[in-house]
């Protein structure tokens, strides 16, 4: 959902007007997630995105697995963080699996998109011994 808001500035006789687009927030950028790890616990952090005219009220962390043949599983909602100043979550992973993560932000206009450019992938090294 996107709304255009017409704003005018009359401060100091500026008399300038412009359109301000209001809508869902931009997709947050995941920070510093390694491409691979030997650890089964990972901490995901992200930057606060542009809110596009309304305060962010929630972040949602999604995960999907990458199958052995390279195909992608469905997105699973892992966490809903309702404290918008908290931009960190700790997750448990399984050795030998590859995962993709994305974080969305929500404001009164709705939830941001799961943008392809913001999806981060991680491979958990190791596997089960036979």
Image (cartoon, rainbow, N blue to C red):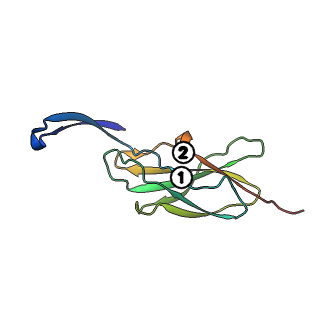
> Where is residue 30 drawn, in percent x and y?
53, 52
> Where is residue 114 drawn, in percent x and y?
52, 43
The numbered dot on residue 118 is 2
Quarter location, residue 15: top left
Quarter location, residue 84: bottom left
Pick out the residue farthest to the right: 130
Please report whichever mark, 1 or 2, sits nearer to the chain's N-terminal start: 1
Check disc 1 and report the residue beneath it: 30
* Dot 2 alpha-carbon crowd within 10 angstroms: few under 14, some 14 to 19, many 20 or more: some
> Where is residue 71 drawn, in percent x and y?
71, 40
* Dot 1 alpha-carbon crowd within 10 angstroms: few under 14, some 14 to 19, many 20 or more: some
Q: From the viewer's perspective, tell me whether residue 15 is left or right of residue 77.
A: left
Q: From the viewer's perspective, tell me whether residue 73 is left or right of residue 82.
A: right
The numbered dot on residue 61 is none
Proximity of marks 1 and 2: CB atoms separated by less than 8 Å: yes
Name the residue located 42 percent from the left edge and 56 percent from the top edge. 58
Name the residue located 54 percent from the left edge and 45 percent from the top edge. 118
Quadrant placement of the N terminus: top left
Q: From the viewer's perspective, tell me whether residue 67 is left or right of residue 59.
A: right
């Amino acid at each position: 959902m996107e709304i255009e808001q017409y704003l005018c500035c009359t401060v100091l006789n500026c008399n300038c007007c412009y359109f301000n687009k209001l809508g869902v927030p931009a997709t947050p950028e995941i920070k510093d997630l390694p491409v691979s790890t030997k650890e089964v616990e990972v901490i995901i952090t992200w930057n606060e995105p542009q809110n596009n005219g309304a305060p962010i009220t929630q972040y949602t962390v999604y995960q999907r697995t990458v199958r052995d043949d390279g195909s992608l599983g469905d997105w699973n909602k892992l966490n809903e963080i309702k404290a918008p100043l908290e931009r960190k979550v700790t997750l448990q992973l399984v050795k030998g699996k590859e995962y993709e993560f994305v974080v969305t932000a929500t404001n009164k206009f709705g939830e941001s998109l799961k943008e392809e450019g913001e999806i981060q992938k991680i491979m958990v090294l190791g596997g089960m011994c036979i």
